Amino acid sequence: MADIRFDGKVAIVTGAGGGLGRQHALELARRGAKVVVNDLGGSVDGSGGSSEAAQKVVEEIKAFGGEAIANGSSVTDDAGVAHMVKQAMDAWGRIDILIANAGILRDKTLTKMELADFELVMQVHVFGTFKPIKAVWDIMKAQNYGRIVVTTSSSGMYGNFGQSNYGAAKMAVLGLMNTLKLEGAKNDVKINAISPVAATRMTEGLMPPEVLAKLAPEYVTPGVVYLCSEEAPTGAILTAGAGAFALSRIYETEGVYLGEGGLSAEEVRDSWDKITDEAGQKAYFNGGEQGQKFFRKMAGG
């Protein structure tokens, strides 16, 4: 099969001043894409800011003959996101790819967490994903082409101690993806999620050095590049780390119909084994499929 190329394509990568985002931006540029390298340049907890990190990545891209421009906007700022999109449109006239990668951490147990810690993480990960998508959405629809990759986490899908804010945000991103995969289908706008395990500023304090050495961002980026390609699926959750790749899905059991009249908590308790029986479980593509199942079971199917 032919190599995956992005000649003539324009990409925006948020949080691309280092770590995963930097690697995504570099690889897209190596494969021919013109890239807006966005990074606020703040610390891991979201404080501070400078466009210097983004500019350094732009210089790396230009050094091997690629095209790129830097943007230092916060992905939570409406005017900043609008400016980022305007930069791309003014320079190249289209936007084909968006990788929503920007993120922060404010890890604390719920007892120690302040409301501000929860709100800021939600702002950066949820609104900081939604706002760039919203800003490019109609452009992609008008082109009848677009590829969007959002960033989720095992902390959202499965949980991780001390990350209730981060986990909630990363699961919210999947809810956004699951609806937009339906809304974008008619115009060939595909959206997928990457769930990475990689050595970055955000993970360096969570794992020992010998483990981090095996988790280079370069081992995640090939999956992201595929999700940005013309052949990409839509609505997929790709997990990646240390060179391994897997697909994550939410499955629902077939369940059991208990009737409509006189239902009780005891009936649910006594039927628990049938309710949770994994035989025949399915991964639905849209919420309507779940409703269809319930009506089928009510009719005796």
Image (cartoon, rainbow, N blue to C red):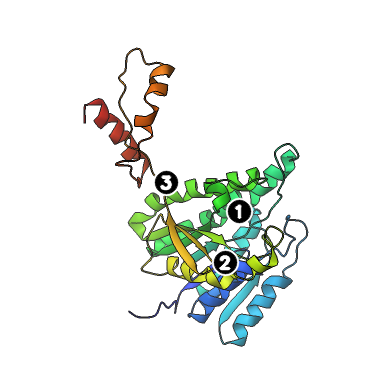
Q: Mark 3 points at which residue?
A: 250
Mark 2 and mark 3: span between their CA atoms?
Answer: 27 Å
| Residue 119 appears in the figure | yes
Query: Residue 148 placed where, x, y %?
Result: 47, 61
- Give the amino acid type for the residue marked by disc 3 in the picture: Ile
Circle 1: element type: helix
Classify 214 as above or below 294.
below
| Among the 4 quarters of the image, the one containing residue 253 | top left
Considering only vertical position in the picture, is 210 above or below 119? below
Q: Position of residue 291 (x, y in %)?
A: 32, 34
Q: Which residue is drawn at 47% across and 67% down?
A: 223
Q: Classify residue 45 by image quadrant.
A: bottom right
Residue 139 at what x, y percent from top left? Answer: 46, 61
Disc 3 element = loop
User: Marks 3 and 1: which is nearer the front?
Assistant: 3
The residue identified by callout 1 is 128
The answer for how far apart the CA atoms under marks 3 and 1 are is: 24 Å
Residue in the picture at 61% in, 84% down: 62
